[in-house]
């Protein structure tokens, strides 16, 4: 079945710098890759997603890139701010198959003042 | 507020007991997903229902079961509870089948003593 590896497990960056979180997946049939942000004590919330027919997607300070050949995708956060501190989860799923969505183990991002 | 309602918010029970967690999806959403999140752990996919039928199964224990009712609300039943079942249980809903944004509820925190 699908397996999603996420790195690093913890990331500390200075406020204003960029943060990059990387994920790899195993099932080449996966075609939908969402990223969720979970603040302490709160529910996960979608921040950006990408489908397999697109190589990159941007939304203000957040961007996601997808390399289907290498089966990896990354989250890029630029000009980091204190409110970016949270746990970020990547996920992969295969639409129109068994609809199972597999999450990575998460990256705890700390934005340092 | 995501529009997904989970009850109760907190549940404290003893080992060997049985509990039922309830989830009401967003209006119009046909898919319901259940996840388990243990302390400092990622989101473990348990099971998905689509329009009343089981659609996908993850790492769900045999002691756990779920169902989705005609009004689309879902219940997760946990029986013969063990200390290790203590976790945050999230429900998420999605408009259609797989490969779509999931909207998470606030979760039910289960403590097994």
Image (spheres, coloured by chain):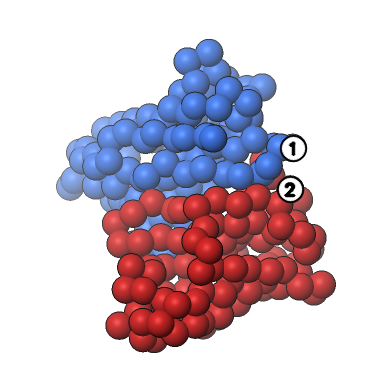
Chain colours: A blue, B red
Residue A12 visible, this orientation: yes
Q: For the residues tagged 1 and 2, is the chain the same? A: no
Rounded to the nearest angstrom, the CA distance separating label 1 from label 2 is 7 Å
Q: Describe the element under mark 2 as helix, strand or loop.
A: loop
Contact check, label 1 and label 2, Cβ < 8 Å: yes
Q: Position of residue B96 (x, y in %)?
A: 76, 51
Q: Quadrant of the N terminus of chain A?
A: top right
**In the figure, residue B10 lies in which quadrant?**
bottom left
Residue B104 visible, this orientation: no
Compared across the picture, whether A33 is left or right of A39 comes to: right
Q: Tell me the residue at 58%/23% (across/down).
A: A28
Compared across the picture, whether A95 is left or right of A35 comes to: right
Q: Nearer the viewer, residue B6 or B65?
A: B65
- The disc label shown at residue A38, or none: none
Q: Describe the element under mark 1 as helix, strand or loop.
A: loop
**In the figure, residue B26 lies in which quadrant?**
bottom right
Q: Tell me the residue at 51%/69% (across/down).
A: B63
Residue sitting farthest toward the right = B70
- Callout 1: residue from which chain? A
Compared across the picture, whether A78 is left or right of A2 comes to: left
Q: Neighbour class for label 1 at 10 Å: few (<14), some, many (≥20)?
A: few
- Callout 2: residue from which chain? B
Task: Judge whether A68 appears above or below B88 on screen.
Answer: above
Compared across the picture, whether B95 is left or right of B15 comes to: right
Q: Position of residue A16 (x, y in %)?
A: 27, 37
**Location of mark 1 (residue):** A96
**Location of mark 2 (residue):** B97
Q: Tell me the residue at 45%/35% (across/down).
A: A4
Q: Nearer the viewer, residue B6 or A77?
A: B6
């Amino acid at each position: 079945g699908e397996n999603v590896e996420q790195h690093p497990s913890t990331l500390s960056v200075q406020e204003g710098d960029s943060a990059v979180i990387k994920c790899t997946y195993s099932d080449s049939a996966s075609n939908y890759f969402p990223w969720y942000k979970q603040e302490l004590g709160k529910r996960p919330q979608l921040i950006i997603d990408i489908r397999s027919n697109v190589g990159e997607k941007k939304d203000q300070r957040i961007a996601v890139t997808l390399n289907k050949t290498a089966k990896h995708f990354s989250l890029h956060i630029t000009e980091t701010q204190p409110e970016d501190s949270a746990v970020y989860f990547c996920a992969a799923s295969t639409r129109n198959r068994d609809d199972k969505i597999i999450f990575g183990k998460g990256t705890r991002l700390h934005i340092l003042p | 507020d995501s529009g997904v309602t989970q009850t109760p918010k907190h549940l404290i029970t003893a080992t060997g007991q049985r509990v039922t967690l309830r989830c009401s999806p967003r209006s119009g959403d046909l898919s319901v997903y259940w996840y388990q999140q243990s302390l400092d752990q990622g989101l473990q996919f348990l099971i998905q229902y689509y329009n009343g039928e089981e659609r996908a199964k993850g790492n769900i224990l045999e002691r756990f079961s779920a169902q989705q009712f005609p009004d689309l609300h879902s219940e997760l039943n946990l029986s013969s509870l063990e200390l290790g079942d203590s976790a945050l249980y999230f429900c998420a809903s999605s408009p259609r089948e797989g490969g779509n944004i999931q909207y998470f509820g606030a979760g039910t925190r289960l403590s097994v003593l």
